[in-house]
Image (cartoon, rainbow, N blue to C red):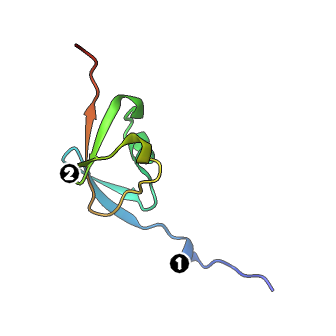
Protein backbone atom coordinates (compact mmCIF):
# COMPACT_ATOMS: atom_id res chain seq x y z
CA UNK A 1 0.00 0.00 0.00
CA UNK A 2 1.51 3.35 -1.00
CA UNK A 3 0.94 6.63 0.77
CA UNK A 4 0.77 9.86 -1.16
CA UNK A 5 1.44 13.27 0.27
CA UNK A 6 -1.42 15.58 -0.49
CA UNK A 7 -0.75 18.98 -2.00
CA UNK A 8 -2.04 20.68 1.14
CA UNK A 9 0.68 19.03 3.24
CA UNK A 10 3.48 20.18 0.96
CA UNK A 11 2.46 23.85 0.67
CA UNK A 12 4.74 26.42 2.24
CA UNK A 13 3.31 29.22 4.29
CA UNK A 14 4.41 32.81 3.79
CA UNK A 15 5.41 34.80 6.85
CA UNK A 16 6.07 38.50 7.37
CA UNK A 17 9.15 39.79 9.21
CA UNK A 18 10.78 43.16 9.66
CA UNK A 19 14.42 43.54 8.64
CA UNK A 20 16.01 46.88 9.55
CA UNK A 21 12.55 48.50 9.58
CA UNK A 22 11.63 47.04 6.17
CA UNK A 23 8.76 44.57 5.87
CA UNK A 24 9.65 41.43 3.90
CA UNK A 25 7.84 38.20 3.13
CA UNK A 26 9.53 34.80 3.45
CA UNK A 27 8.68 31.13 3.19
CA UNK A 28 8.15 29.59 6.61
CA UNK A 29 10.90 27.27 7.74
CA UNK A 30 13.70 29.62 6.67
CA UNK A 31 16.57 29.95 9.14
CA UNK A 32 18.64 33.07 9.84
CA UNK A 33 21.48 32.25 7.38
CA UNK A 34 18.81 31.70 4.71
CA UNK A 35 17.27 35.09 5.47
CA UNK A 36 20.64 36.80 5.19
CA UNK A 37 21.44 34.99 1.95
CA UNK A 38 18.11 36.02 0.40
CA UNK A 39 18.87 39.63 1.28
CA UNK A 40 22.45 39.44 -0.10
CA UNK A 41 23.93 40.12 3.33
CA UNK A 42 27.33 38.57 4.07
CA UNK A 43 26.81 36.65 7.31
CA UNK A 44 30.50 36.84 8.18
CA UNK A 45 30.43 40.61 8.56
CA UNK A 46 27.27 41.29 10.57
CA UNK A 47 25.78 41.01 14.04
CA UNK A 48 22.07 40.29 14.45
CA UNK A 49 19.39 41.36 16.92
CA UNK A 50 16.14 39.40 16.88
CA UNK A 51 13.11 40.79 18.69
CA UNK A 52 15.29 43.09 20.80
CA UNK A 53 17.89 40.49 21.83
CA UNK A 54 21.31 39.80 20.38
CA UNK A 55 21.25 36.43 18.62
CA UNK A 56 24.63 34.70 18.93
CA UNK A 57 26.04 33.51 15.61
CA UNK A 58 26.29 29.99 17.09
CA UNK A 59 22.46 29.84 17.15
CA UNK A 60 21.74 31.21 13.66
CA UNK A 61 21.43 27.86 11.89
CA UNK A 62 18.95 26.48 14.42
CA UNK A 63 16.87 29.68 14.60
CA UNK A 64 13.89 29.71 12.26
CA UNK A 65 12.30 32.96 11.18
CA UNK A 66 8.81 33.31 12.60
CA UNK A 67 5.90 35.46 11.54
CA UNK A 68 6.22 38.87 13.18
CA UNK A 69 9.95 38.62 13.97
CA UNK A 70 11.87 41.88 13.98
CA UNK A 71 15.50 41.69 12.90
CA UNK A 72 18.17 44.38 13.05
CA UNK A 73 21.40 43.68 11.18
CA UNK A 74 24.53 45.61 12.12
CA UNK A 75 27.74 45.72 10.10
CA UNK A 76 30.82 44.77 12.10
CA UNK A 77 33.54 47.38 11.87
CA UNK A 78 37.11 46.72 12.90
CA UNK A 79 39.04 49.51 14.47
CA UNK A 80 40.83 50.62 17.53
Up-down relation of residue 21 to residue 47 (above or below) = below
Q: Quick one: which residue is furthest to the right in this view?
A: 1
Per the image, label 2 sits on a secondary structure element best described as loop
Q: Quadrant of the C terminus?
A: top left
- For marks 2 and 1, the one nearer the N-term is 1
Residue at point 69%, 79% (across, down): 4
Residue that mark 1 sits on: 8
Residue at point 22%, 44% (across, down): 20
Per the image, label 1 sits on a secondary structure element best described as helix
Q: Residue 6 placed where, x, y %?
A: 61, 79
Residue in the foreground of this view, choosing between 52 and 71: 52
Per the model, the C-alpha gap separating discs 2 and 1 is 34 Å
Residue in the foreground of this view, choosing between 72 and 58: 58
Residue at point 43%, 43% (across, down): 58
Residue 51: numbered disc:
none
| Count of numbered circles in the view | 2
Up-down relation of residue 19 to residue 47 (above or below) = below
Residue 52: numbered disc:
2
Q: Residue 55 placed where, x, y %?
A: 32, 46
Residue at point 46%, 53% (across, down): 62
Q: Residue 69 placed where, x, y %?
A: 27, 58
10 Å crowding of disc 2: few (<14), some (14-19), many (20+) = few
Amino acid sequence: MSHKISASNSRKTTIKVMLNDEQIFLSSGLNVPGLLQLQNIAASSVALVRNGQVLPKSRWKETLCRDGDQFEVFALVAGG
